[in-house]
């Protein structure tokens, strides 16, 4: 699929993840993202890692559907919101 690496400086991504199945899947088969960390907090988890290219990252986030909320960075949160809005207009 591509779109995972660029010459840009990496930034921290923070995602609030819900859904026991997604949390368990990421515990059992951790994504190979730099600095990946999953911290359980009751019925959700906070996922942190470093990235430098939003295109592949957005595909990965969108596959999680409404179980994932991008908390940081704001620019990625806005890009995901725009994609979700474009999808909403289609359907």
Image (cartoon, rainbow, N blue to C red):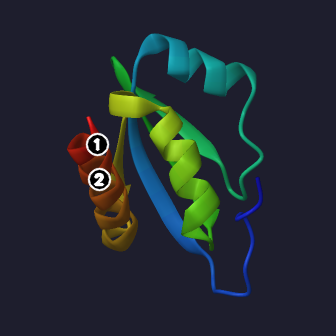
> Residue at (35%, 55%) from the top-left corner?
83
Residue 79, quarter of picture: bottom left
Mark 1, other Cα within 10 Å: few <14 / some 14–19 / many ≥20: few
Mark 2, other Cα within 10 Å: few <14 / some 14–19 / many ≥20: few
Name above or below for residue 73 compared with residue 47. Answer: below
Q: Which residue is mark 2?
A: 86
Q: Can you give x and y, in whole percent of width and height, for residue 30 in the image? A: 72, 33
Instruction: Say whether residue 36 is left or right of residue 12.
Output: right
Name above or below for residue 72 compared with residue 87. Answer: below
Quadrant, the C terminus: top left
| Tag nearer the camera, 1 or 2 | 1
Q: Residue 82 has which mark?
A: none
Asked if the residue under mark 2 is in contact with the one under mark 1, i.e. CB atoms within 8 Å, the reply is yes
Name above or below for residue 40 compared with residue 90. Answer: above
Q: Residue 90 has which mark?
A: 1
Name above or below for residue 17 compared with residue 71. Answer: above
> Residue at (63%, 57%) from the top-left corner?
56
> Residue at (29%, 65%) from the top-left corner?
78
């Amino acid at each position: 699929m591509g779109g995972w690496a660029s010459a840009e400086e990496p930034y921290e991504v923070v995602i609030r993840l819900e859904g026991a199945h997604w949390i368990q899947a990421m515990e059992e088969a951790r994504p190979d993202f730099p600095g990946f960390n999953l911290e359980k907090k009751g019925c959700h988890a906070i996922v942190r890692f470093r990235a430098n290219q939003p295109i592949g990252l957005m595909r990965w986030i969108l596959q999680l559907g409404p179980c994932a909320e991008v908390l940081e960075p704001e620019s990625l949160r806005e890009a995901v919101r725009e994609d979700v809005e474009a999808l909403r207009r289609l359907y």
